[in-house]
Amino acid sequence: MNQGVMTVLEILKYVIPGIVVLIATNMVVGRFLNSEFRQKQLAMLSQTQDVTIRLRLQAYERLSLFVERIHPRQLVPRIYQQGMTVTDLQQALIYNINTEFEHNLAQQIYVTRQAWETVRRTKEQEIAMISQIAKNLDPTAPGRDLHVKIVDYILTTPGELPTEIALNLINEEAKRILSYGAQA
C-alpha cells in the first residue's frame, strides 16, 4: 500500500473512536440536559400552581367577605345613623354596596365565571331589595323605618337570601380548589 493510504488509515484509527466517543457523549449529555430541563419545568409549574391556588383562595375569601358585608343583617346596622331619613339610609346603603363591589372588581380574574356572576347578581338583588322597600316608604320618614322594614323582609322571606346562596357557592368552589388544586 502506498504511504498516503497508510497515513489515512492511521488517522482514521484515531479519529473514528473519537467520533464514536463524541457521539455517545453528545447523546448522554443531551438526555441529561433534557431530563434537567423537564425537572425544572415541573418545579416551576408546581411553584406557579402554589401561587395560583393562593391567589384564587384569597379571591374567594375577599368575595366571601364582600357578600357577608352586604348582607342586610351586617350592612344596615353598620351604616344606619340616628337622624337619617329613608332616602339618606337608602342612598348610603346603595353607595356602600357599590363601593365595596368596586373595591373587589379585580377578584373576577381569579374566580370562575359562575362565582363572579353570582356575586354580581347578589349585589344587584340587594340594591333592588333596598330600593323596593324604600319605594314603599315616605322618603322623609326616619331611616329607622327602612331599617325595620329590611329586618322584617329578612325574617319573613322564605328560602335563602341571595347573599346566602352566593356564600354557599363561594364556599363550595373554595373547597373544590383546596381539594383539587389549580385544576379545579
Image (cartoon, rainbow, N blue to C red):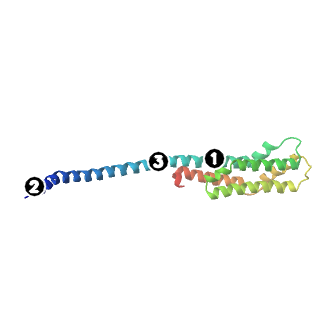
Q: Nearer the viewer, mark 3 or mark 2?
A: 2
Residue drawn at x 87%, y 50% is 87
Per the image, label 2 sits on a secondary structure element best described as: helix
Which of pointers 3 and 1 lies earlier in the amino acid sequence?
A: 3
Which of pointers 3 and 2 lies earlier in the amino acid sequence?
A: 2
**Type of amino acid under label 2:** Gln
* Number of other residues with Cα within 10 Å of mark 2, as a class: few under 14, some 14 to 19, many 20 or more: few
**Type of amino acid under label 3:** Met
Give residue 126's position: percent from left, percent from top: 76, 54
Give residue 19's position: percent from left, percent from top: 23, 53
Mark linked to residue 43:
none
Q: Which residue is mark 2?
A: 3
Q: How many marks can you see?
A: 3
Look at the picture and state if 184 lies above or below 144.
below
Viewer-closest of 98 and 121: 98
State the CA–CA distance, disc 3 to disc 1. 26 Å
Q: Which residue is mark 1?
A: 61
Asked if the residue under mark 2 is in contact with the one under mark 3, i.e. CB atoms within 8 Å, the reply is no
Q: Which residue is mark 3?
A: 44
Per the image, label 1 sits on a secondary structure element best described as: helix
Which of pointers 2 and 1 lies earlier in the amino acid sequence?
A: 2
State the CA–CA distance, disc 2 to disc 1. 86 Å
Residue drawn at x 47%, y 50% is 45
State the CA–CA distance, disc 3 to disc 2. 60 Å
Residue 87 in the figure: left or right of residue 33: right
**Type of amino acid under label 1:** Glu
Viewer-closest of 163 and 131: 131
Give residue 110's position: percent from left, percent from top: 60, 52
Residue drawn at x 71%, y 53% is 163
Per the image, label 3 sits on a secondary structure element best described as: helix
Outermost top residue: 82
